[in-house]
C-alpha cells in the first residue's frame, strides 16, 4: 500500500532523515570562533562581555549576564532573591523539567498552576489559587515563544509582593505589549542551547534592570569571587581577589560568545525564514479537524516562533501520541515533545504524589502534543515532506468510527 506507514512496513516519505533542529551557521560564526581560538583566550573574556552588552541592548534590558545555560540563569535568579527552604515558587507543569528542578535545588517547594487551553501558557487565575503565605515567586514560561500573560501576572505579583522570573528559553525575539521580553520582570532567563533561535551549543543569559542584583549575580556566577576576577590573567596585571560568597561555576566562555555574537546579529534574518515555515504548516494543518494548531498571536504581542507544535485529538485516533511520534520518525521526519507535564515525570510522581488528573489542561495538551522541525535552513522540499508525512499518518491512524 502506498499510504502504509513505514513503521507498519510501508515506504517512508524521506530516504534521508530530516533532523528536528539545526542551527543556522554563517561564515561569521566560523570567523569569530577562529579568532577567539587563535587569541589564546578561551574562557570568559572580552567576547563574553561584548555579547552581554549587545544582548542587553537587543532585549532593552539594563544588564545581561552570560551564563552556561538557562537552567543556571534561573537558579541563580532564585539564589539572588533569597529563595530557599520553606518558600514556595509557582510555575507551570507544561515546561521542561529544569524549570521545576531549580526550585528544588534551592530546597524550596514547587507549586504548579494549570495552563490556559488556548495559549498553553500558565493561567493567571490558577496562579492566584496556588498562592499561600509561603509563596515568594512566580516563574512564567513563554512556551514555544508565545509571551505569557505578563500584565495579569505582574499585577498578582505586586498585590502579593512576589518576585517574577521569566523563563524565556524559547522567547528571544518575543515582545509583550510594546516591551521586549527580557526588560519587564525582576529577572528573565534565556537559553542558547543548540536548537534555540540564538545558539551557542550550550549557554544562557540572565537579564535584569536592577544593578545590585546584576553585580551580585556576576560574583556568584564565578565561584563567588570579587568583581573582575575573570580578568585576573590578562595583560592588565594581577589583581588580588576574594571569595566573597560560596558561588557557582556557571560562566560563559568566549568560544560560546563568539558563536552568539553573529547569531544575534542575524536573528531577524533567521526569524523571517522560521515564520515562512510556520505559515506553511499553519495553512495546511489548521484545516485538519483532528488536530489542534497554535492559536493566533495575542494583540500587541510578538511570538518568537521557536517551536511549532500540534496537538492530536486523542478521541479521533487509533494510536496515542508516542506511537504517532515514533511513526513520524520512521517516515524520516525528526520531531519532539514539548512537553510531557512535569508533574507526571517519575521523580515528581513518586516524591510528591502527583497523579493524572491533577492539572487537566496541561495533561490534555502535554500528553498529545508533538513538535515539528522549524529552522532557517529548511527548504521547500523539507517543508512539503513534513506536511506529507503528517497527513499520511493522520489518514492511516484516524479513527473513522
Image (cartoon, rainbow, N blue to C red):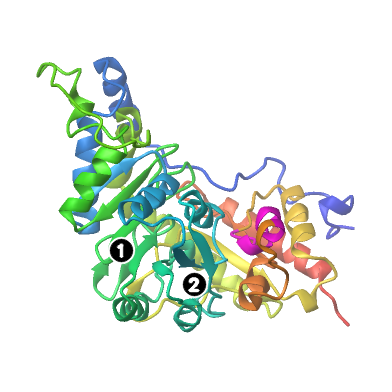
At 29% across and 46% down in the image, what residue appears?
Answer: 264
| For residue 165, above or below residue 373 | below
- State left or right for residue 68 relative to residue 93: left
Are discs 2 and 1 less than 8 Å apart at CB?
A: no
Q: Find disc 1 in the rendering and name its residue.
A: 181
Task: List x then y, in percent, for residue 321.
Answer: 74, 63
Would residue 304 be counted in the magenta stretch?
no
Q: Which range is magenta?
A: 338-350
In the structure shown, which secondary structural element does the residue marked by tag 2 occupy?
loop
Q: Main secondary structure of the magenta part?
A: helix
At 67% across and 53% down in the image, what residue appears?
Answer: 347
Dot 2 or dot 1: first in sequence order is 2
Q: Quick one: label 1, few (<14), some, or many (20+) residues within 10 Å?
A: many
Residue 54 seen in the current view: no
Q: Find disc 2 in the rendering and name its residue.
A: 121
Considering depth in this image, is 368 or 371 the residue closer to the camera? Answer: 368
Amino acid at each position: 500500500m502506498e499510504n502504509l506507514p513505514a513503521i507498519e512496513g510501508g515506504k517512508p516519505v524521506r530516504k534521508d532523515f530530516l533532523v528536528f533542529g539545526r542551527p543556522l551557521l554563517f561564515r561569521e560564526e566560523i570567523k569569530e570562533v577562529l579568532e577567539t581560538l587563535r587569541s589564546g583566550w578561551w574562557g570568559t573574556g572580552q567576547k563574553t562581555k561584548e555579547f552581554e552588552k549587545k544582548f542587553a541592548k537587543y532585549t532593552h534590558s539594563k544588564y545581561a549576564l552570560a551564563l552556561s545555560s538557562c537552567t543556571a540563569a534561573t537558579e541563580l535568579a532564585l539564589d539572588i532573591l533569597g529563595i530557599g527552604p520553606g518558600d514556595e515558587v509557582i510555575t507551570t507543569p507544561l515546561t521542561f523539567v529544569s524549570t521545576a528542578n531549580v526550585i528544588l535545588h534551592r530546597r524550596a517547594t514547587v507549586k504548579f498552576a494549570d495552563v490556559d487551553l488556548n495559549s498553553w501558557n500558565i493561567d493567571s487565575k490558577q496562579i492566584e489559587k496556588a498562592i499561600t503565605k509561603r509563596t515568594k515567586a512566580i516563574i512564567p514560561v513563554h512556551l514555544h515563544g508565545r509571551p505569557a500573560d505578563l500584565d495579569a501576572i505582574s499585577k498578582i505579583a505586586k498585590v502579593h509582593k512576589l518576585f517574577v522570573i521569566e523563563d524565556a528559553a524559547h522567547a528571544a525575539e518575543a515582545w509583550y505589549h510594546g516591551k521586549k521580553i527580557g526588560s519587564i520582570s525582576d529577572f528573565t532567563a534565556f537559553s542558547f542551547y543548540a536548537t534555540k533561535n540564538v545558539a551557542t551549543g550550550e549557554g544562557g543569559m540572565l537579564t535584569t534592570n536592577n544593578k545590585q542584583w546584576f553585580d551580585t549575580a556576576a560574583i556568584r556566577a564565578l565561584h563567588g569571587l570579587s568583581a573582575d576576577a575573570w580578568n585576573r590573567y590578562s595583560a592588565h596585571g594581577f589583581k588580588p581577589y576574594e571569595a566573597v560568597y560560596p558561588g557557582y561555576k556557571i560562566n560563559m566562555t568566549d568560544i560560546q560568545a563568539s558563536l552568539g555574537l553573529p547569531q544575534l546579529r542575524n536573528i531577524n534574518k533567521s526569524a523571517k525564514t522560521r515564520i515562512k515555515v510556520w505559515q506553511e504548516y499553519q495553512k495546511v494543518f489548521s484545516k485538519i479537524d483532528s488536530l489542534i494548531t497554535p492559536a493566533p498571536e495575542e494583540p500587541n504581542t510578538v511570538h518568537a516562533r521557536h517551536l511549532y507544535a500540534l496537538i492530536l485529538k486523542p478521541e479521533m485516533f487509533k494510536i496515542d501520541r508516542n506511537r504517532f511520534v515514533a511513526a513520524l520518525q520512521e517516515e524520516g521526519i525528526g520531531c519532539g515533545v514539548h512537553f510531557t507535564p512535569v508533574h507526571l515525570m517519575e521523580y515528581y510522581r513518586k516524591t510528591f504524589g502527583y497523579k493524572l488528573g491533577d492539572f487537566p489542561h496541561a495533561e490534555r495538551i502535554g500528553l498529545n502534543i508533538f513538535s515539528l522541525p522549524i529552522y532557517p535552513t529548511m527548504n521547500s522540499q523539507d517543508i512539503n515532506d513534513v506536511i506529507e508525512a503528517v497527513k499520511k499518518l493522520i489518514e492511516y491512524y484516524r479513527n473513522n468510527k
